[in-house]
Amino acid sequence: MQPQQPYPAPQSPMQPAAPKKPRELRDYLIWGMVACGVLLVLCLGAWITIELMGKTSSDTGKTQKGVAAVLEPESSVPYTRTITSTLGVKIPYNARELEGFGFAEDVTYSDTDLSEARPYTVMRVRPVETSEATRSEVTLASPELRITSSPAKGYWELLATKKEYKDLSKIDMLVKETVSAHTQDKMVEASDTEVKNINDIDYRKVTFTTTNERYGVKTVSREDCYMTVQHDRPYVACISGIRSSNFAVTPQLETVLEGVTYDGLDSKALVSDATGATDASMLDAKAAEQAADNSSSQMNEGSNKSSKSSYEIPAYLASTSGFTMLAGASPATVRVGTLYCADIKLSLPEGGDGPTLTGACVDKAGSGFFISRDGYLATSGSSVQVKPQEAISAYITNAPDSEQALDRLQRILDYLVESRSIMQTDADALVAGVQERDQDIIAKINALSTLIAPEDISVTKEQYSYAVQLADKPIVVNQNGDGSGSFAYTDTVIEAALEAKNYSTDITQAQIYDGGVVKSDTALLKMKKSATYPTLTLQDDGIADKATVGLVGLPMYAYGSLASAQFRATPMYRANAVTQTFSGGEGQKTRAIATSSHAGLVGGPAVGIDGDVVGVATYGNLNCPDRKCFAGTVVRDTTGITSLVKQRNITLQTKSASMTAWREGLSQLTRGNYQAATKLFAQANSLYPQNYLAAKYADYSKSQYGTATDTSTMNTVVGVLQMMSVIAAGILVLLGLVYIALKFIIRPHTETQYGQMAGGQYIDPNQWRQQVPVQPQTIAPQSTMPQPTNWQPPAQPQPYGQQPSVQNPVSSPVNGAQPYAQPQTQPPTENAPGQTWPLQPPTQQ
């Protein structure tokens, strides 16, 4: 038997070369995401670098003069005039709102003549008045600040000679002398002395209250006097003429007192004449007033000279935050005018008919602000409602002329005499006092309505009309022959209707003056002309103590009719910190702000530093409960407005496109991005043409192109970087979503123990690997040794594709021979690298 040949090497079937794998879509997605990520990082890095370098803003925190001058032009911005006395006192005051007088050497000086230093012994400051108020015989004079001093060298020595002043300090002697001079009038009562520090100057404060019950009419007035000794000289500052009808003026005068300084004493101005110690300037207020008024005919002709002052940015606009706070609220702040006419029937207390007051007309004005873009605006109830007693007083004081005023006064006095409220002699004295313009008598005329019981007053006919001033054109009132009036409506003066009100009428003005709280004073008006109005957002969180609050409103003169008493046609601004918080009743809070208000600002918005409304301004309709809000005003919170809105089930539309563009324009303006600001202001003006400031600021922004503060170019670059960042981020996200969709949703490849599965078939990941030839296996040569008895012939080959049954017996050793393995006829259970299953069986020889 010939030796068996070894198995030939199995011939693997011809395998194609592994094809070059084409790039898949996922590869391109990855490359795209990497590129977008790099672009995004570069854009963000450049953007942040430019911002950190401060190249996109020229805002230094201080408002530029040109920016402030558009909001508060030189014709209306406060400017300071100073009364300088060589007796050692300087009194600066805002000559836009106040007028000053100085009495020296028997001459009264005013206006620009006060710029020259003189030995003024009497210096007076009071609110400016209209010519109408000056001519009227029934106009009550406004309170005024009067500061006096003595030119006598021996003033203290003369006082020390009085027994009651023995062993007293100079300030105590001055207080006693002042109190003694005032209380010579038995109707005057002095309060206890109070120590008051004002602007680091120590004063002694005494309040003098005058209760006058002559002629059957009770009137009360107050005078606050502040005494100090500076540089060994006496000074007395008194705010006189404070009444229930005009107490709101007092903070303006207290603000002046805050700015008074005591220096510049010229010893040459002092006189050695002992009689100087009893100069009228150091006596009671009445004597000092007469001393000044009697010399008014000698007033220098130069008092009417106009003056020019260099523009100074007011303190409330000095910072950009203050500017944006106040300017942001300006377009939504309006003037609200009210005309009221009624026929009032008076009844006698014991029965019977009294006179009918025909044409009892009242005109008044306040401020308001839009809270919804469809035309709802909030204001104070006292600005749009009239009490019956108020109408009776106006029946006299608002008469078309002096002759009719006296006729109407006589009708009221005749009724009071018939009702036994006053005597005929009292009535005659009152008429005579009016003709002499006696201020005490005029105060009684204004208080006559308090003698009429509410149940004796019945309104038989009444009519309200309202006008809202939207721009810088004033409200025009057409006067009728009977004393009534009608509004002249235009594109900027729009008619409105009363939507709702919540106004307490059960509290008198005298009670308010004494610190009584008006629990509710809110009203809502609805514009009759459809437009998209700018709005302010109400904030219900309240105001934190010491937080800065700004007041915005359209000012009025303290006295005069609506037709003549509009102080100016543009808003007035105030700003300072919260000093005190009080309970306002019905869950409301009232807060004192360390700034004076102004006539006409009542109902205007009190805004926080973010521009939201945190309160409503007051004037004459609310006082500090303790009457100690020195040089301050009181604002209500917004609870009354929100309650009224809920009661009426009104849905406020607080978002206004014109206001959004306006405020964003202000932001870009302060940053120096003038190109963007110009576009935004033009947009704001287009959306709301009544915003006259938008057009002015658009022109101003355009004029600043290319200046040192212009950051438009860098802001444009940043804008491009921002846009590229957004685009890159968007594409990056989109590519990421596509990649995820391809990987897990659109073409899923399920991994199994045999490989991946695609299209329902298994894919062996090793099938395209390079095959390695299998080494042939050699069968042991035929042995001549005896075969074991249990030897069996080799199995016949099985058909191709079937696995043969292979036995692998081990022969028993014969004659010590070692057993040998049988030839392997079955392929290995695992393919060698490069092999495929099944292997081709060997061919039989």
Image (cartoon, rainbow, N blue to C red):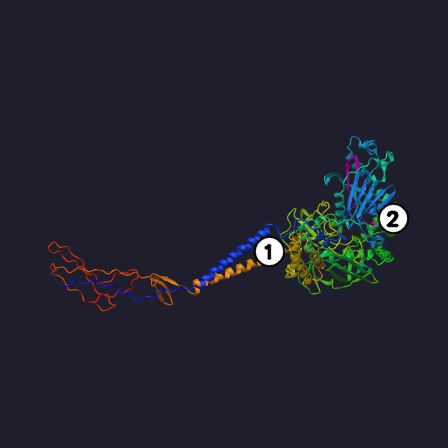
| Number of the label disc, if any, that sits on residue 413 | none
- Segment colored magenta: 215-234
Quadrant hosting residue 5: bottom left
- Amino acid, disc 2: Glu
Magenta stretch: includes residue 217: yes
Could you tell me which secondary element the residue under label 1 belongs to? Answer: helix
Disc 1 crowd rating (10 Å Cα; few below 14, some 14-19, many 20+) is many
In the rendered image, residue 387, in percent from the top left (x then y), is placed at: 75, 56
**Which of the two labelled residues, at mark 1 and mark 2, occupies the earlier sequence position?**
2
- Amino acid, disc 1: Val
Question: Can you identify the residue that label 2 sits on?
Answer: 301
Question: Can you identify the residue that label 1 sits on?
Answer: 718
Quadrant hosting residue 259: top right
Q: Are marks 1 and 2 in contact (CB under 8 Å)?
A: no
Magenta stretch: includes residue 190: no
In the rendered image, residue 626, in percent from the top left (x then y), is placed at: 71, 45
Quadrant of the frame with the N terminus: bottom left
Q: Nearer the viewer, residue 94 or 22?
A: 22
Q: Nearer the viewer, residue 562 or 23?
A: 23
Q: In the rendered view, would you say 532 is above or below 104?
A: below
Choose mark 1 or mark 2, whichever is in front. Answer: 1
Marks 1 and 2, how far apart at CA: 62 Å
Residue 746 visible here: yes
Q: Main secondary structure of the magenta part?
A: strand
Could you tell me which secondary element the residue under label 2 belongs to? Answer: helix
Judge left or right: residue 723 versus residue 400. left
Q: Nearer the viewer, residue 466 or 95?
A: 95
In the rendered image, residue 549, in percent from the top left (x then y), is placed at: 67, 50
